Amino acid sequence: MAQELSPATQGARHETVAAVDLGSNSFHMIVARINGGHMQIIDRLKESVRLGEGLTENKYLDPQVAERALVCLERFGQRLRDFPLGSVRAVGTNTLRQLRPETRFLEQAELALGHPIEVIAGREEARLIYLGVAHGLAAGPERRLVVDIGGGSTEIIVGQRFSARLRESLHMGCVSMTRRHFADGRIGTKAMQKAELTGALEVRPIREIFRRSAWASAVGSSGTIKSIAAVVMAEGWSEDGISAPSLARLRDAMVECGKASALNLRGLTEDRKPVFPGGVAVLLAVFDTLGITHMQVSDYALREGLVYEMMGRGHHADVRERTVSTLSRQFQIDQEHGRRVEATALQLYQQAAGPWSLSQRSHALMLSWAARLHEIGVMVSHSQYQKHGAYLLRNADLAGFTRQEQAVLAALVLGHRRKFPVQEFLGLPRGIQDCARRLCVILRLAVLLHRGRSPVTKPNPELQAEGETLSLGFPDRWLQDHPLAQLELEQEGILLGAAGITLGFH
């Protein structure tokens, strides 16, 4: 794995890009050509891996399912072999969110695919789904309700134009619901009723806020909803999309048949049959709980959203920048001080980037954001505020950020003062431990130089880095004229020395 905090930070400066969606039911890949700000899909690949089927109670992965997934990723990897770093964005969703890190499956998956894989949080998945769906619909000012049923989670979003206003990720999907209520393949009246009630209970906490959000039309995406639409239209129960009566007729037809394997419905593919009952139960619950009477179906979903996100980042429309600015305002961070720390940190970074192999654009971005957010925990308590800040950044829903990026931000903020948190960096994926640790050292020095919070310009010391040895050079007599700064540097040398880093200054 390359020393890269996130492949997505490179932006879509490539003529041809690819997006890979590692879902709990299917793995999808699209290859698209970018031309003049427009996306033209030139290739699609899909395999029903059913990753969620192999998730054990203790959050490990069944070896046979893991092997099935890796073989699929190797096939995808053959198609992506000549794609440069940054032109492919691969994300994992519900099942990969739950897997224990010690399974090491993610590392194996990255080797098979040949590109980094990011695990995204449920609400971030919802935002990207909405972005994809919105680009596939005619532009209009009305608010839309978007529903995406995956293998292990269901995302529900209300948005307007290209912005998601409300977004939720619920812990139910076609695979998980089928395993819970239709594991033996039988579709009985009681089993279907229990499945619908389970789904309704999951939707209930968000029911009122979504009902009151004044959406004008409902849109569904993903394989489950597309399969349901294909069946109800092929059977003649609905002329366009999915209506509430057609969904009820589908439920009755399935119960009458009695077994998933025996379903003989026009439009239903063989690979969809095993998880179809759970998917129908989820959609029935969503229709009933949110009062949906009719749903359009979109061909676009998460993977298309990934491509549009890459295009946006390539044209300086990075949603993460908005997220950082919003956090700064919400948590009343001293933004002027944060900007001063950021400027010094980036100056030091430019000097250390070469010898410390910090050449990726993502390194500077993460350092910049950490500098601006390093005091976010003060809003909770000034005592040990670095710990409060790290907790917030690790666990908050940060639009645009992957879980790995949030973990790095949290580590940088935790380590910007006091004892250097060696174990925090060892807990990151091995491929990014060294670069994240070195970024933290740079951030610490920038924060230290602005300890007095004075708006007066600092001396811009020269930084030399060689291995684990650092040397800061100040203008003549500056240290003698600033004895407090000299004492702080001496103390910092002791703290860094305990982490195996030597700091010298003159």
Image: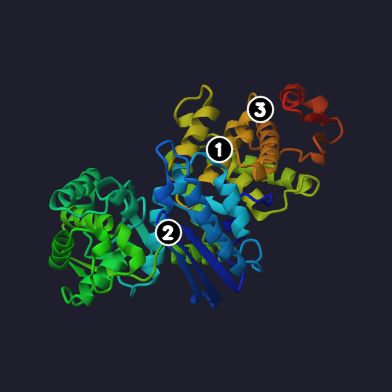
The quadrant of the rendering that contains the C terminus is: top right
Residue 250 as seen in the image, left or right of residue 455 = left
> How many C-alpha atoms fall within 10 Å of the one at disc 2: few (<14), some, or many (≥20)?
many
- Nearest the viewer among 404 and 375 is 404
Residue at 33% over, 75% down: 138
Q: What is the number of the mark on residue 102?
A: 1
Disc 2 marks a residue whose amino acid type is Leu
Which label is found at residue 128? 2
Cα separation between marks 1 and 2: 28 Å
Mark 2–mark 3 distance (CA, rounded to whole Å)? 35 Å
Residue 274, x across and y down, in percent: 32, 58
Is residue 461 shown above or below 23?
Answer: above
Q: Amino acid at mark 3?
A: Phe
Question: SS for tag 3?
Answer: loop
Local crowd at mark 3 within 10 Å, few (<14), some, or many (≥20)? many
Res 57 visible: yes
Residue with the mark numbered 3: 420
The one nearer the camera, 108 or 402, is 108
First along the sequence among labels 1 and 2: 1
Q: Position of residue 482 (x, y in %)?
A: 76, 26
Mark 3–mark 1 Cα distance, whole angstroms, equals 24 Å
The image shows residue 257 at horizontal and vertical percentages of 17, 62
**Circles 3 and 1 in contact, beta carbons < 8 Å:** no
Determine contact: label 1, label 2, CB under 8 Å: no
Badge 2 marks a residue whose secondary structure is helix
Asked which secondary structure carries label 1, the reply is: helix
Q: Amino acid at mark 1?
A: Glu
Considering only order in the chain, which callout, 1 or 3, is on the residue closer to the N terminus?
A: 1
Picture coordinates of residue 128, whole percent (x, y): 42, 59
Q: Nearer the viewer, mark 3 or mark 1?
A: 1
| First in residue order: circle 2 vs circle 3 | 2
